[in-house]
Amino acid sequence: MAVYRASAAGSQYVAKKITPHSNFDYQRKLQDSVASSPHVRAVIDTVPKHRLFVFPYLTNRLLQFDNKTLSLAQKKSILKRVLLGLADLHNNCTLHTDIKPNNIMMNCEAGPSEDVVALKGCVSGNEIWRTPETWARAAQNTPSDVFSFAILSIYAVTDIMVFYVSESERKGEEPWRTILRRHVSYFGDLPGLEGLFNHIGNEENPYYAPLLEMTPSSNADNPRKPFSLWRDDTLDPVFKDLVGKMTGLYPPKRITAREALKHPWFYGVGDV
């Protein structure tokens, strides 16, 4: 997808060329369905002749920030606005499928009373933020976005990318094996795994057997490290409770974006 930066009447814009195999009108309808949300960066104009979508230009991405320079209150405010955008998408039966720091756009040139945080893009997921059902090529739905948002939240609060795997950590195995093992170790339990196996559907799925080998009962020599038991100065029990409710391995058991907005961790952070 070609991306251009443009300007008109003193304002900056981003123009994206829609690929030929994408249905231009369908993509436009998706954009129109969330255009009223202040928390989703939606199309503000189109150039059908050139298959261009025009978006407002926002100056920064969450990934560009040093998390240590942001207060917890600022992080909560950013995450709540992202979650509001996600809830607006889900209300329109639209999945994002690529929740990650690089898709959290912020206008740092705006004044304190008009700062902007918006959710950008709808493309395939990145492996560091990917859900277990996505790895297993199983069905995705709104709970998949919620899981990825939880992983994003851990990064925003702690500066830890829980599924980032360095070369030394791979120990010669394929990255997906290490990442899935962490899914089970940090967020899995037997009921969640049983639900995930049912969600995957059948033993012919190439990820079924590897996941079965990662069950707690099969890893006595490599015990789980549940996120709920992590010790870190940036982690409080309320935040860990929120993350736990969003990261169950069985997708239907995860809370929704709207339910997450009502969690005590977000109390006092603006109005829902």
Image: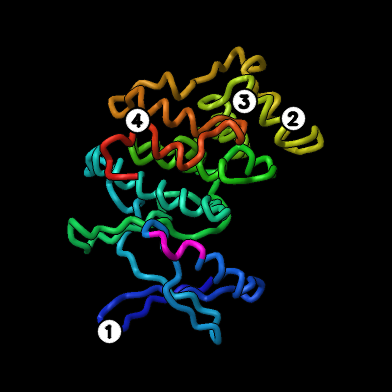
Q: Earlier in the sequence, mark 2 or mark 4?
A: 2
- Judge the density around disc 3: few (<14), some (14-19), many (≥20) Cα neighbours within 10 Å: some
Q: Nearer the viewer, mark 1 or mark 2?
A: 1
Amino acid tagged 3: Gly
User: To which residue does mark 2 refer?
Assistant: 209
The residues bearing labels 2 and 3 have C-alpha atoms spaced at a distance of 16 Å
Q: Residue at x 75, y 38 (%)?
A: 206
Amino acid tagged 2: Ala
Q: Is residue 143 magenta?
A: no
User: To which residue does mark 4 refer?
Assistant: 264
Is the Cβ of the residue at disc 3 closer than 8 Å to that at disc 1?
no
Q: Secondary structure at mark 2?
A: helix
Q: Secondary structure at mark 3?
A: helix
| Quarter of the rendering occupied by the N terminus | bottom right
Is the Cβ of the residue at disc 4 closer than 8 Å to that at disc 1?
no
Counting from the top left corner in percent of width and height, residue 46 is at 48, 79
User: To which residue does mark 3 refer?
Assistant: 192
- Judge the density around disc 1: few (<14), some (14-19), many (≥20) Cα neighbours within 10 Å: few
Q: Secondary structure at mark 1?
A: loop
Is the Cβ of the residue at disc 2 closer than 8 Å to that at disc 3?
no
User: Looking at this view, is 168 or 97 the one in front?
Assistant: 97
In the rendered image, which quarter is residue 221 located in? top right
Amino acid tagged 1: Ala
Q: Earlier in the sequence, mark 2 or mark 3?
A: 3
Q: Classify residue 136 as left or right of residue 74.
A: right
Q: Nearer the viewer, mark 2 or mark 4?
A: 4
The residues bearing labels 3 and 1 have C-alpha atoms spaced at a distance of 54 Å
